[in-house]
Amino acid sequence: MARPEDMWQCQTVNCGYIYNPDKGDRRGKVKKGTLFQDISDEWRCPICGGTKKCFRPLMGEGSTKADCELPVENDPAKLTAAASAAKVATRTDQKETDPMQKYVCEICGYVYDPAVGDADADIAEGTKFEDLPEDWTCPICGAPKDNFVPED
């Protein structure tokens, strides 16, 4: 598992993509295990197209955390109970009504469309979201399946 110091986040408005060396960047043809510093200067953020200069490390020297501290809710019951209940209810309702439901990544906005599949990950056209392998991740930001919600 990558250390936070090795993970870099895009700082452009409304982006927030996190480059994780454990995942690489399939679309940018960056192999797994490649540190951010070793990526070509020509590489661009797969979400917003920002250059490497738009990125900061998650932790350590040069990180956003070193520059500021934002208030953080420490009581998980206040945030996760309601959010989890709403997410589960939405997924259950829509799964039952539309077997080819599209799913949206909550991290980067990528839309998984069963009619298209995910050719980069050898996922055939017509593969329902529920039938994706458990280790499938978002082809843009690397988020796991549990970060996807049904598209409205």
Image (tube, rainbow, N blue to C red):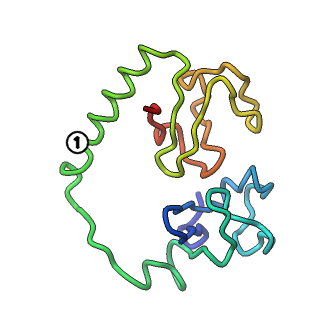
Q: Quadrant of the C terminus?
A: top left
Answer with the quarter of the image where residue 25 lies: bottom right
Locate residue 85 relative to residue 116 in the image: left or right.
left
Residue placed at 57% from the left, 38% from the top? Answer: 111
Looking at the rendered structure, the secondary structure element under dot 1 is helix
Residue 24 % position (x, y): 71, 56
Q: How many marks?
A: 1
Task: Determine whether 151 is above or below 13 in the image.
Answer: above
Task: Determine whether 25 is above or below 124 in the image.
Answer: below
Residue 37 % position (x, y): 72, 75
Locate residue 6 relative to residue 70 in the image: left or right.
right
Circle 1 sits on which residue? 81
Task: Determine whether 134 is above or below 82 in the image.
Answer: above
Task: Determine whether 30 is above or below 57 in the image.
Answer: above
In front of the other: 141 or 33 = 141
Residue placed at 61% from the left, 30% from the top? Answer: 113
Q: Quadrant of the N terminus?
A: bottom right
Residue placed at 69% from the left, 28% from the top? Answer: 116
Going by the numbered disc 1, the residue's amino acid type is: Ala
